[in-house]
Amino acid sequence: VLDQGYWSDGLMTAPSDEALAFDIQAMKDAGFNMLRKHLKVEADRWYYHCDRRGMLVWQDMVSGGGAYDGWETSYDAYQRQWLRECRGTVTHLRAHPSVVTWVLFNEGWGQFDALACAEEVHLLDPTRPIDAVSGWYDQGAGDFQSVHNYFRPLAVYRDRRDLTGYARLAGGRAFTISEFGGVVHAVADHSAFAGTYGYGATDTPAEWRTEVHRTLDAAAALEGVGLSAYVYTQL
């Protein structure tokens, strides 16, 4: 499940240690075994709760707080800062057994030379696989071909590395749908704000449950043709 770590009463800060544990356990009770911590490094206690409750974590690197363009991401100063923060994240969190994958770039946000960045992280931590580019602009790097799919029928694609013939990147990668779903149902008096955001809306809780199960079943059916993991949007 995609987990952005938002809180209605603290935005990016949880109100209590119990609240950190609650979300993890709720997703485990719902049948999920992995949380993708999206573009945020959480409090250490969150990873501790994942460790002891057996919840796997795919950890995103933070990409910054503003809009990016080709000029900004080409700056040497930006790239050096990103690499410094990336190294710090890996070093800080690699002792947690719950963290099983590093996710470097999301949907092209701040992305540059994903191959070099993946090699850097692999040298720093050779024990974990790397999702170098989640969603867009796959450069053939890392251990996953990782796509986001909200508006098309779910499917497994042939590895881009095979299509582009990168000789030194021989060997297939695992295929993952690293974001999909996102159906929303607004419950009166149970929302922090008036608006809703999602990739499709339902009118009743029953319709929401039906649509979520339909979407998850469609993803699970792809295991036999090469789907290795999926990340449902969202907690």
Image (cartoon, rainbow, N blue to C red):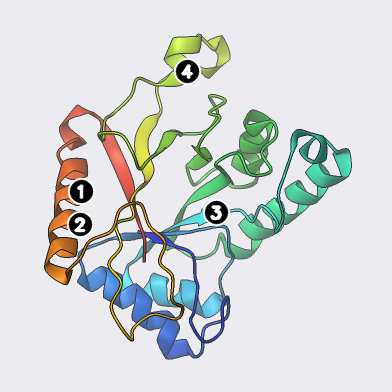
Residue 215 numbered tag: 1
Q: Considering the numbered disc 1 on the image, is that residue within a helix, a strand or a loop?
A: helix
The residue carrying pointer 3 sits among few (fewer than 14), some (14 to 19) or many (20 or more) residues within 10 Å by Cα, namely: many
Q: Amino acid at mark 1?
A: Thr
- Does the residue at mark 2 contact the one at mark 4 (Cβ under 8 Å)? no
Q: Please state the horizontal and vertical placement of residue 232, each as a whole percent of the image.
A: 32, 53
Dividing the picture into quadrants, the one containing residue 43 is: bottom right
Mark on residue 212? 2
Q: Which residue is mark 4?
A: 161
Q: Is residue 234 left or right of residue 133?
A: left
Question: Label 4 to label 3, Cα distance in Å?
Answer: 23 Å
Q: Quadrant of the N terminus?
A: bottom left
Question: Which one is earlier in the sequence, the residue at label 1 or at label 3?
Answer: 3
Name the amino acid type tagged 4: Arg
Image location (x, y in percent) of residue 15: 51, 89
* Residue 163 coordinates in the image, percent (x, y): 44, 11
Which residue does the numbered mark 3 point to in the structure image? 60
Q: CA distance from mark 2 to mark 1?
A: 5 Å
SS at circle 3: strand
Identity, as a three-letter code, of the amino acid under mark 3: Asp
